[in-house]
Amino acid sequence: MTWLRIFFSLFALGLVAACAEPVTRNSDPRILLMGDSMMAMHGMTGKSVSHAMEQHLGEPVIDRSVSGARFLYALPITGAAGLNITKQYREGNWDWVVLNGGGNDILFGCGCGLCGNRVDRLISKDGRRGVIPGFVSKLRQRGSRVIFVGYLRTPGVRSPVEHCVDEGREMDARVARLAALDRGVFFLPMSDLVPNGDRSYHALDLVHPSAKGSAAIGARIAGMIRPSP
């Protein structure tokens, strides 16, 4: 029914809007974080990736990430509110834009099976074409350096998204090729972050990061923004 669709759209919009951090005219932050639930987890408890980055860097990080967000998302209202990762962007004097994404596109778009066309739509094999390179190019044109962050893995542990491993490796390889094309674009893998058999970096669902996992992700990103002397 039409009224039900309207209700759930407005409900979803409210949830999404509550998750995305506003950018005010009174602030002058230089780091913008975007992406999906890997970034957004633990935001309400102050233990998200952006909170860890702030602790390590000693400066504010604007977190626009939204759980469930995708790059290939067509619905206009909820997409504009952040479920489309490219729509999470807000104008600012960003020295760094940090983002992740693509996992929801693959998992929910094709169930990690016969995903070649969808992966190609996200990013071509040579890293030059697709939604991700196009968006990264726009960010670079605005003068920002860009860090694209890969996903955590569960080495030695069976997870509900185990069947997505091949697609994840291919995505990492393609984004790494994209980064190699531009000195202002960096790929930061997370595939080696979790020790073999260690479940403590993940939530109980073995998909999303635990608070410990978010802290470790944030620390690794901060290390790239401000390398150790």
Image: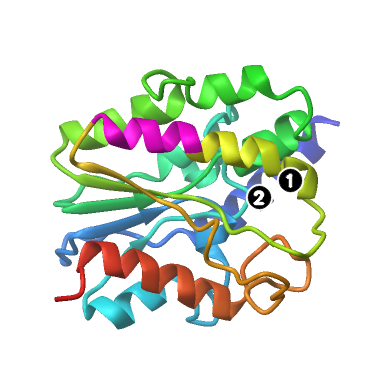
Looking at the picture, does residue 184 appear above or below residue 22? above
- The residue under the point 29% across, 80% down is 56
Q: Quadrant of residue 221?
A: bottom left
Q: Write down the quadrant of residue 139 in the picture.
A: top left
Is residue 17 or residue 45 the one in the foreground?
A: 45
The image shows residue 218, relative to residue 79, as above or below, that is below
Q: Which of the image's four quarters has the C terminus?
A: bottom left
| Amino acid type of the residue that numbered disc 2 sits on in the rendered structure | Ala
> Residue at 28% of width from left, 50% of height from top?
97
| Front-most of residues 175 and 57 | 175
User: SS class of the residue under badge 2?
Assistant: helix
Question: Which residue bears the numbered disc 1?
Answer: 8
Magenta highlight on residue 44 = no
Residue under label 2: 12
Where residue 105 sits in the image (x, y, percent)?
63, 35
Q: Please tell me which residue lies in front, 108 or 200.
A: 200
Q: Bounds of the magenta span?
A: 173-181
Residue occupying image coordinates x 27% and y 29%: 137
> Could one spot residue 68 in this view of the protein?
yes
